[in-house]
Amino acid sequence: MVSQTPQIYQTAQIRELELLARQRYAIAGNELMIRAGRSACSYLQKRWPKAKTIAVFCGVGNNGGDGYVLAQAAHEQGMKVNVWQVGDPAKLKVDARAAFESCKKSGIAFKPFNNQNHWQTVDIIVDALCGIGLQGEVRKDIGNVIDLINQARVPVLAIDVPSGINADTGAILGTAIKANATITFIGMKLGLVSGSGVAYAGEVYCDDLKLPKEIFSLTPGVLEKISLAQFANYLQPRPRDMNKGAAGHVLIIGGGPGFSGAPRMAAAAALRVGAGLVTVATHPKHAAVLNAALPEVMCTGVWNGRALKPLIQKATVIVIGPGLGQSLWSKSLLKTALASQLPVLVDADGLNLLAKKPVTRNNWIITPHPGEAGRLLSLTTQQVQADRLHAVQQLQQRYNAVSVLKGAGTLVLAPHVAPAICEAGNPGMATGGTGDILSGVIGGLLAQGIPVGDAAKLGVCLHASAGDLAAAAGGERGMIATDLLPFLRRLVNL
């Protein structure tokens, strides 16, 4: 059974759900462990139906207990099972110890692990070493086992989270299991859908362990998943008497010398999601070239912020940053844009300039990637990635903006609402120009009257979903930003 909730959890909320299961519904901890282990065994057999032999690596926590239950269930169904114990079994807690004793009595081959063991000839390795309770770096002995498993070239199923991944952030705690698949329990963990956890978890399946639906309403998660269905009301068919003025006017500001492509891609994206009019304010040196490449867009060369003001008066929304640069010209345009009363989206070099001279305002969106977020927060990229949820919360608080932290598991946080995460998207989108496409998408939605928070969420979801469709059509490697454009048009017309 998949999770009953679209929410994402951290360890504290999972523990609260377990406590509620015990206190309100008399579902004991050992019962949850049995359900988890048997569910993991069932998933393993469905995921790898030809597997005959498995090696189960068990630690001394409750994650190890799940592994013992899986091992016993697999043994009962005729699989050849070896259990490798990592750590002193005398340290096992009550529920895990009961699973340990039951597993031993079933006649399974059960051995303490050392580097000389011969276990690499199995069909599947099961990682039940650490689980969601791990906070600090993995111990050296466990780290050595993790490294050996990663070198074995055998498919790996991780139980709950890959060992070495922080379940709350997705950060790698020294070293981590690189799993082919992960089965997680009760609710989806943030560390599996954001940060490095995305790359280490492989395919992720969530089983709610048949907990009563009411439990999930009592303990909200820390994030909500973004889906296109949430915003279907914004994408209804247009009335037959629609006119371009009613679909809004996007003003895109950017394109310093040598960077005309970025605002052009943003402009095309704004049009593809339904903006009625798009104007690009760019450097006079290449205004004519940009206009020739995209004739549907009005293009004006501006020398400074003063020349920008008449264009702002005609616009519905401003997008500034694509190809902007960081020159005096760039600074003048950013200052003028931020002084307007229109909704504003700031991206790319607009963010780099903002980091040097921070401001706050209402009714705006910032869309940094981790490096830009680090500059905005005076942190390193690694610090941002180590706790992406905390980083996006800091961005929102510091700039009073709807904050979009791009990357694997893009996060969106608007003032006074719960943060949200987009699980769509793929590595093929890690190429120049995809951020400019996103800026145009969100700008085009804002122009159509969608509030800034919803426009950011819907824009992120449309952008990532278009990326997935583009990858499905031609593969991830070699995909370029403009490959998303036809799929954006398709998605806004579903």
Image (cartoon, rainbow, N blue to C red):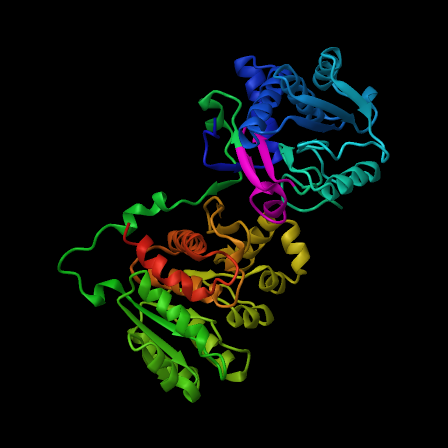
Q: Residue at x 37, y 63 (%)?
A: 485
Q: Which residues are magenta?
A: 179-205
Residue 371 is drawn in which quadrant?
Answer: bottom right
Query: Measured from the top left, where is residue 270 in percent x and y?
Result: 35, 65
Is residue 201 covered in magenta?
A: yes
In this rendering, would 240 be left or right of 338? left
Q: Nearer the viewer, residue 285 or 326?
A: 285
Is residue 327 covered in magenta?
A: no
Query: Measured from the top left, where is residue 375 in percent x and y?
Result: 62, 65
Q: Is residue 180 above or below residue 206?
A: below
Q: Residue at x 63, y 49 (%)?
A: 196
In this rendering, would 285 be left or right of 328? left
**In the rendered image, is residue 338 in sight?**
yes
Q: Nearer the viewer, residue 343 or 465?
A: 465
Residue 253 is drawn in which quadrant?
Answer: bottom left
Q: Nearer the viewer, residue 244 or 329?
A: 244
